[in-house]
Amino acid sequence: MAKLTSFLNLPVPSPNEEPYQDSMDAFFANMDINLFSAVTDRNILMTGGGTITFNFSTETLTWTQPILITNFVTGFFWALQPGSAVIRDGEFLYVTLVRGLEDIRFQIDLLASVKSKLTDVPQKELHLDWVVASRIGNKIYLANGKTIPAEADGFAVVKFSFPDFVNTEFLGEGLVPAPDGFRREFFVRRNPESNLLAVYWDGLRMVPGLDYTLVSPRRVVFASPPAPVPGATLNCDVHEQTVLFQGTYPEASIWSEDVSSILPPDGSVTEFPLQQAHAVGTLRVYLDGLRLKLGDFAVVDATTFSLAVPPAAGMRVLVDYFMDRYGTSDFLPFFVFNEIPLQVAVGVYQTSANFQAGTTQVYLNGQRRYRGWDYTESAANKITFTTPPAPTATVLVDYQKP
C-alpha cells in the first residue's frame, strides 16, 4: 500500500516506479493542484487592529480593535477580536484558518495562540496556521510589513493604514460617447468592482435598475424615455477592479442601496431601514438624485435613518455607506463625508482637513459638480468654483485624506 502524505493524504511515489522522475513530477503536479485549488489563505491582507502596542517589559502585544484578515482573491473575512498576548523572543502570534465549507457557510471568529514552531497536524479539513506577528529580539514584525522597534521607554505604537484608496477610485469620469438625444447606451472607461459604480445625469444620482441598467461590466443602458440630450453631462464614480483591495474595500462599501424599494415613501414615512448595519459617519443619502446634508437626514441607529421631511409617494431614496463589519471603521481615518466647508472668499471654500488630490466630491444644492469644470482643487484644503455659488447655496464635500 502506498504511503500517504499526512496533510493532503496523497500517495507518495515508490522508488521502484519507472520512470521515477515522471512519477515525482506527477506527484508534485498533484500537490500543486490540491493545494492551490483549495487554499483560501493565499494573498491574505491584514488590516485593522486599531492601536497596536508592544510592552517590552511585560512582553505583551496588545491590539485595541479587531484585526481584519482578508483574502483579497476570495473575499473571505476573518476577525481576530481585540486582545493581547505575551510573545517571548523567538515566538509568534498566529491564528488557525480553516479551509473548506466553513469558509463559505459562515464567518469564523479566530482565536490567537502563541508558539515557536509550526507543526503539520493531520486534519480532515485543510487548515493553515497564519502568523500575525513574530518577535525576534527586541523587535515585533507584523504580517502587514510593519515593525515595532524597541524604544527607549520600552513602548512603541504602530497603526495599520490604507493609503492607496485613491489609486483604485476614479471620480467624476465621463461616460462615452457624448449624448446626442437618441443614444441610450454608454460606456464606462474602467471595469467597476462589484456594484461600485455611481452614475450621475446632470449632477443627479441615478437609480440602478430603474434609471439605468449595467448590462455588462462597462456598458450602461438608460431607461426610456427620454434619451440624454446633447450637452447633458453623464458622469460616474467607479471603484476599479483591482487585486490589492478586492474583497476588502468592496465587501465593506455599499453604493446605491435603494431603500425606497424596501419601504416605499407615501408622504408620511420618515424613517427608513438599511439592509446592513453601517459604520458611524459613513452614511450618504440621495433623494430623487439630490444629495442631502446632515439635518435633512439624521441617523437613528446603525440600521435606521430618518428624513426631516417625509418624501412623497414615488420619490426614490438611495444611500451609500460602509458596513460595520469586522473593523471596517478602520477606513474612517481616510474618508470625510457630509462636510459643509467653510467659505473663506467669494467662490472659495476650505475643508476642515487636507485632502488627497483628486478625491473631492462636491455637491452644490444637492447636485454633483465636477472637478476641472465646475471647480478646482486650488490648495490642499481649498476648492474654488468656476462660477461662485449664490450666498444662500449649500456646498457639501466628501474627500479622502492624504
Image (cartoon, rainbow, N blue to C red):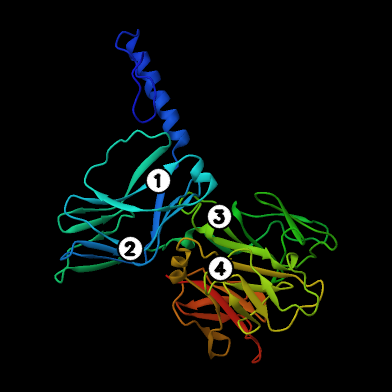
Residue 83: give its label.
2
- Alpha carbons under labels 3 and 2: distance apart: 35 Å
Secondary structure of residue under mark 1: strand
- Alpha carbons under labels 2 and 4: distance apart: 24 Å
Can you identify the residue that label 4 sits on?
A: 278
- Alpha carbons under labels 2 and 1: distance apart: 18 Å
Q: Residues within 10 Å of mark 1 (few under 14, many from 20)?
A: many
Residue 97: give its label.
1
| Residue 373, horizontal then vertical, whole percent | 62, 73
Q: How crowded is mark 3: few (under 14 residues within 10 Å), some or many (20 or more)?
A: many
Q: How crowded is mark 4: few (under 14 residues within 10 Å), some or many (20 or more)?
A: many
Quadrant of the frame with the C terminus: bottom left
Instruction: Give the residue displayed 42% in from the left and 62% down from the top.
Output: 162
Question: Looking at the image, do the residues carrying marks 2 and 1 touch, with CB atoms under 8 Å apart?
Answer: no
Q: Quadrant of residue 172?
A: bottom right
* Mark sitting earlier along the chain (2/1): 2
Q: Can residue 235 be seen in this view?
A: no
- Say if 95 sits above or below 322 in the image: above
Q: Quadrant of residue 31?
A: top left
- Alpha carbons under labels 1 and 3: distance apart: 29 Å
Q: Can residue 325 be seen in this view?
A: yes
Q: What's the amino acid at mark 2?
A: Gly
Q: What's the amino acid at mark 3?
A: Glu
- Alpha carbons under labels 4 and 3: distance apart: 23 Å
